Amino acid sequence: MINTSGNRTEFVNRNAAECTVLLKKSGQFPIERPGDIAAYGAGVRYTIKGGTGSGEVNSKETFTIEQGLERAGFAIVSKSWLDAYDEVRKQARKKYIKELKAEARSRHENAFIFSMGKVMKEPDHDLAIEKECETAVYVVARNSGEGSDRAVSEGDVRLAKSEIRDILLLNKIYDRFLLVLNVGGALDLSPVAEVKDILLLSQLGTDCGAVLSDILLGRQNPSGKLTTTWAEFGEYSTEGTFGDWNDNRYKEGIYVGYRYFDTFHKTPLFPFGYGLSYTEFKTETAGVEADRDVFTVKVHVRNTGKYAGKEVIQVYLSSPADQLDQPYQQLAAYAKTPLLESGGECELRISFKLSDFASYDEQSEGYVLEKGRYIIRAGNSSVDTVPAAAVTLDETVTTLKTRNCLGKPDFTDIKPENGKDEPVPDDITTFTLTAKDFEQREVSYDKEPEVDPRIKALTDEELAFLQIGNFDPNAKGLGVIGNAAKHLAGAAGETTSQLVSKGIRPLIMADGPAGVRVALRYYEEGGYQYDAENKGMLMDSMLEMMGPVAGFLYKRIMGGKKVPQNAVIKEHSATMIPIGTAIAQSFNTELAEAFGNIVGEEMEEFGVHLWLAPALNIHRSILCGRNFEYYSEDPLVSGETAAAITKGVQKHKGCGTTIKHYAANNAETNRYCNNSQVSERAMREIYLKGFGICVRKSQPKAVMTSYNLLNGTHTSEHRGLIEDVLRAEFGFEGIVMTDWVVDIMNGPDSAYRGARSDEVAKAGGELFMPGTKKDYERVLAALKDGSLSRKQLEINASRLIGMIDGFYEN
């Protein structure tokens, strides 16, 4: 276990280079010592620490890249350009806010809702650049966030014209030039592909400049790998739909990310699993061992360069296409070396279980390994692997018998043309397996949940209170969206306080996933805490949008409270860890667990029981506005990273994670009422698999469902998702809650309604959050008319109070 003692932000900064990816190198970096540097681009002064929305963390101090470079001893000689860019950006911002307000009015939408997650595109300009010293950097910055998706436009996914012009010019006039990407998601870098040195810095928290300075000076060596394929935008799959208002059709099926690129012979700019280092490594497969269906690949790694560094070895599996089509390969396991000095070496033993990669057969309703030849590959990226062993299975084996329970889309998934078997070397290690080498199981779906005896004594009204998040029955407002807690200022929500007299205390929840999201400045009154800044989850862009009516709308919609004149203002500041994608790019589960440990320590300090993170939705499209919170296009990386972070958090007594958003939440457009149409196979092999890995490896305390529907049913109301897959198949033992559902957030002109508290209760969800009187009354009405049974509420309440008991144990 990595030691995180001491200053937590310093720990993040010391290790963050593992989360960065060196995309191209010429040998000009690192440099020996700090000196003059010409720094250009929006990210120098407008550095993005992480995305917007729930991914924000209220930290006491935040530094720009400009400040970080200067603190490291660099003298920035391009101040005049940066000053001129300030004015360009200021004018662009005014124009942007004006246009955003006009668009909200024209669409007859609430300004607060409409502005959520929207960010200004990078403005074009005609500022001149001349060579001023020997070293230059250009920092491209992109922000995105909860509530809006990205666009295939200049200044967003595509580079702005002025960015392309300036980057190419700097690459031409400077021998030592580094293009730095302070971004949370992929960009189309095809117009600047000739640049010799490119670093994906990502978004690393409050001091990205300190990390960049360390990398420039060779104090840290980038060792991350891409968890998402980067390509010219036209090369990405177009078979499915993305961003449609009512229905997103996942026609691409299992062919997501590198599975699509590899299988359909598309060429990316930078493939999945790719990443360079200042040093060089020589890798060689030293053998493969088998114990029934568990395979261990031994890889020898030697540092042949002159810098200390780490390498990631990836093991892929190619499965035979018999009755079921198959991707060319899928990631089966990975491991990272320790820090190897120049000339240092080590041997990695990387294991995986073949049955964990069985395919889902909708016809037989189970997971199967089809007869034929399986190829095990090893390498340091998805496009740089060599066969390490072959496995022959002489008959098709059903490893897990389940049942179809997720609904059907209105289309059939795409299928590639089956190619010929790939030739493998004659001397390759070969194994032969039979059905006897596999554990074969059948899932039981009829286990009767236990009801806590204490629940029997509760009234219907008390059971309904337990089903709904904490709300004031006498309040007139809607409750604070994303900031609905009373016992901890800025926390996201709580379970009910109505039954404290009966020994049922509330659970406090704080948002994530980049740290513990609580109010920076707060005051106490009457035993409760209040946000002294009264912002809740409002971002600066929202406040700008609302202008002088911001206070009225906030108090009306969000339940804000005026700060008393005699209030004593206090502070609690949380550590911001790197965004989810960056953590996953480290391919280091020990480091991920260490970041989770930091979160757990601060949860204990603040009195938080449930952290509303990690988030592990799949990077189905690079356009998703919340991809920065999520880990990868690959479910194995997603599940392993989430499990590691969960272990780090839950080693702290009374602290638990809430993995989210379950499931198929891969776009932000009309996210409250959008229907994801996905096949049973694609759901199980791509979109649910990471959740299953996390549950089985770390048993998180809670799962949060997503806003969207799945094949016509809200995920929070989907008994197949919650009871069949999550509980019966994955073995989940915790509680299930909704995301923060409030009726006013539902998109206009939606074909589907929003989620309802009574339907959530029927499906086996324990908590409807954040909770309003209306939600409470719906549960009582359903009990009265018989559409919701008291027995189901008793089951839900038993699970919840069992969890509460565990958190409050001495």
Image (cartoon, helix red, strand yellow):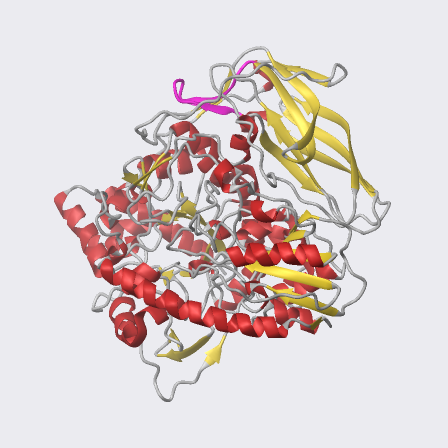
* Residue 316 position in % (x across, y down): 63, 30
Q: Quadrant of residue 364?
A: top left
Question: Foreground: 34 or 249?
Answer: 34
Q: Is residue 571 rendered magenta in the image?
A: no
Task: Tell me: 438 left or right of 386.
Answer: left
* Residue 590 position in % (x across, y down): 65, 49
* Residue 313 position in % (x across, y down): 70, 38
**Residue at the spot 35% in from the left edge and 88% down from the top edge:** 565
Task: Tell me: 491 left or right of 80.
Answer: left
As drawn, which residue projects farthest toward the left? 785
* Residue 81 position in % (x across, y down): 59, 71
Tell me the magenta residue range.
358-371
Q: Is residue 363 rendered magenta in the image?
A: yes
How many marks overall? 0
Res. 242 visible in picture: yes
Question: Foreground: 455 or 192?
Answer: 192
Task: Tell me: 264 left or right of 710.
Answer: right
As drawn, which residue projects farthest toward the top? 394
Question: Foreground: 743 or 670?
Answer: 670
Q: Quadrant of residue 459?
A: bottom left
Q: Quadrant of residue 597?
A: bottom right
Question: Foreground: 427 or 120?
Answer: 120
**Residue at the spot 48% in from the left edge and 56% down from the top edge:** 155
